Image (spheres, helix red, strand yellow):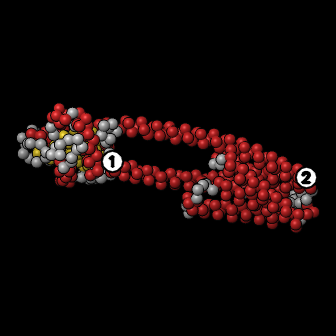
Amino acid sequence: MDTAPLDRGRNHAHEKAAGTNNLVAQALRKRRLGMSFITYLATFLVVLLFAFQGLVPLPIAVHFLLFSLVVNGLIWACIHLNLNLKLRDPSMTMLQITLSQWPALWLMFFLEAGQARAIFLLITVVPLLYGILALKVRNFIQVSIIFLIQYCLLHLALWQWRPQVLEASLELVQLFVFIMVLAEVALIGGFISSLRDKVRQRNQELQDAMERIQELVNIDELTGVYNRRRIVQALSEESNRFRRTPGAFSLGIMDVDHFKEVNDTYGHQAGDEILRELAKTVVGELRAIDSFGRYGGEEFLLVLPQTALHGARIKSERLCKTIEGLRFKGLPADFSVTVSVGVAEAFPQEDTGETLARADRALYAAKENGRNQVVCCSAINPADLACPHGLED
């Protein structure tokens, strides 16, 4: 069955939710970047300690801070301008982890003591811990290889321009330990990441199950439109909105004419098919803001927000003509179904039950007047069905 208007409403809600989720995700990425920058500042305190101890020139410490500001500033700009949303990984996890090494490598080039470089080598591993929240084992291995390559490039630069600060035995031990630490972090981080993926998958399955349960609770199994519970809820929601904000809204009760005779003549399966096709047709004629559901048996309820009585009547008459023109597979070619509709516009001083009662009175009058027609109840409380000013056909 074609439920295009309902689907458009759901798609609009999903798009709106997606936009909201993007804003929340971007704000979270900025907060994480702020946490990362705090780590840079903590490292900068260590750099200052090195400078005061004479292990590194003070200008190099300033360069470290400026380098850190530039790296984090560029990443923040990408997030702020939503450029990261074009990437496969909007969080730019691998990029951030890789760039985080550059200020440290710059500083390590100017350190005189190999032991001091070992301390900073330990600090360069810290950014890998942020990858636990996003990276898989394969990504951890890739980042670890990049780390190792950058560290080797550092030693090539030292061997080329500052060979006097290198101690072969110490550097080899540090390199071996660095490789071991990277391997362990990659394995442990990948394991934690896989656990996180499993939790996310279970949560998604739970969410899908909850949505399915919600659908079963709200959708009529036979026709695929709202069931009585959900359509009455939609009517109540619209009634509450109507009382809060100016505007009109109307409702209609639609009943299939001579439906019992159809079941008796052609069977209940034919009757079910008629109800399904009727529901499909009506839904295809509605706006995204309208609501339509099975009220009971062969009766349906139509909720029309922002629609006065005249507009509701025009729409209901159009539905009547469309339904009368339907043809059904397996039934005679000249067979047609008609409906009667009772329409009422809500008044501010009445409750939902009273509006429904007026629409039901109008439906009764439509049946009494010959069926296959729309009758509107324009009076707030017609005394009886004979009231000429309360009912309009």
Residue 374 position in % (x across, y down): 15, 47
In the rendered image, residue 313, in percent from the top left (x then y), is placed at 18, 51
Is label 2 in contact with label 1 (beta carbons under 8 Å)? no
Image quadrant where one finds the N terminus: top left
Q: Distance between the residues labelled 2 and 1?
A: 72 Å
Q: Nearer the viewer, residue 221 or 217?
A: 221
Element on which disc 1 rests: loop
Residue 3: assigned label:
1
Q: Nearer the viewer, mark 2 or mark 1?
A: 1
Q: Name the residue type under label 2.
A: Leu
Q: Which amino acid does label 1 sit on?
A: Thr
Q: Does residue 314 appear anywhere in the picture? A: yes
Which mark sits nearer the N-terminus, 2 or 1?
A: 1
Residue drawn 40% across the image and 38% down it: 214
**Which mark identifies residue 170?**
2
The crowd level at tag 1 (other Cα within 10 Å; few <14, some 14-19, many 20+) is some
Q: Which residue is drawn at 81% across and 50% down?
A: 178
Please tell me which residue is depicted at 52% across the width and 54% down the height of the picture.
22
The percent position of residue 331, horizontal first and vertical second, equals: 20, 41
Q: Quick check: can you spot residue 80? A: no
Label 2 secondary element: helix
Query: In the depicted view, which residue is nearer to us: 285 or 19?
Result: 285
The answer to which quarter of the image holds residue 61 is: bottom right
Where does residue 41 sit, x and y in percent of width and height? Answer: 72, 56
Question: Measuring 19% from the left and 52% from the top, which residue is drawn there?
Answer: 318
Relative to the observer, which residue lies in front, 277 or 349?
277
